[in-house]
Image (cartoon, grey):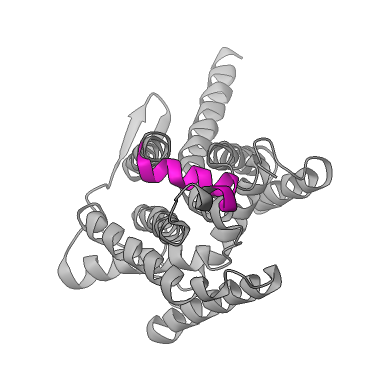
Amino acid sequence: MLGGREMDLSYLAQVIINGVLIGGLYALIAIGLSLIWGVMEIVNFAHGDYLMAAAFFSYIFWSYAGLDPLISLPLIIIIFLSIGFGTQKFIMRRLMDSPTLITIAATFALSLIIRYGFFIVFKPDYRVIRDPLLQGSLHISSISIPIAKIVTLLVALVTIILLFLFLKYTKKGKAIRATAQDREVAKSLGVNVEQIFLITWGLGIACVGIAGTMLSTFYYVFPLMGVTFVLIAFASVTLGGFGSVHGAVFGGLVIGLIQQLGGAFVSPALKDVFVFAVFILVLMFKPKGFFGKY
């Protein structure tokens, strides 16, 4: 009887730990999505495909240059920061005054271009990074925690904390928050709104670039992988509230826990069903989310 109870508690602890570990990754993905929406009111449907692209960059560096994802991470951050700048400068800047439907269509088209561009080049095959630096697991009693997921959570936490500090204490960060609160007032106070938009896209895509790189250490890399993760990111942001960076972190962690608990105690096949059931309930009863600015 006691042994069974201990086993149940160990299993529950394992599931909760798994939920927190994957929830940290979801939070990192969602934070970039929420940041872009909060500042620019643009829903980036290509967000998951940037994640996929980052995972592929990680795989390419490992496959062709022998660089472990943890080693190539700084380079990928620079690449995706630049990609974010480029997306804003050459595509989204021209659409800033367009109706919402136009910007949605533009990011959806961008999503398809990225996704099927990689699909054509790499085919639909699943790829995996073998023997990364972060192989193995940490064992505590009967609980097993993959090292790659522990480090992913730590990287996510450091990234999120640095982003919070940047937004709260730096001049550019305060300008981003001012622009998110009222674009016209910020402009009248001398804020270079165009530059803020550029920085916002850079930061948002850099965050998802970090997430994609770390994801590649324990997940298959394939051209359609972004679809599932962007849906989970939308669910996380909706739960936390669009435009709220704190809310995105909260939403990501809660979604991770719901997914893992539902999969463990009901059915693994239904774990994503629970996520989107929560997504629908939040839309019905609390459409602004728990921390939303709208």
Q: Which of 184 and 169 is in front in this view?
A: 184
97 lies above or below 153: below
Q: Is residue 25 visible?
A: no
Image quadrant containing the N terminus: top right
Identity of the residue drawn at 47% across and 57% down:
193
Identity of the residue drawn at 32% across and 66% down:
82
Find out whether residue 238 is within the magenta segment: no
Image quadrant containing the C terminus: top right
Residue 29 in picture, x, y percent from top left: 48, 52
Residue 242 in picture, x, y percent from top left: 64, 48
Outermost residue, bottom side: 120
Q: What span is colored magenta in the figure?
A: 170-185
60 lies above or below 70: below
229 lies above or below 20: below
Residue 186 in picture, x, y percent from top left: 52, 48
Residue 66 in picture, x, y percent from top left: 16, 65
Outermost residue, right side: 284
Identity of the residue drawn at 58% across and 20% down:
4
Q: Main secondary structure of the magenta part?
A: helix
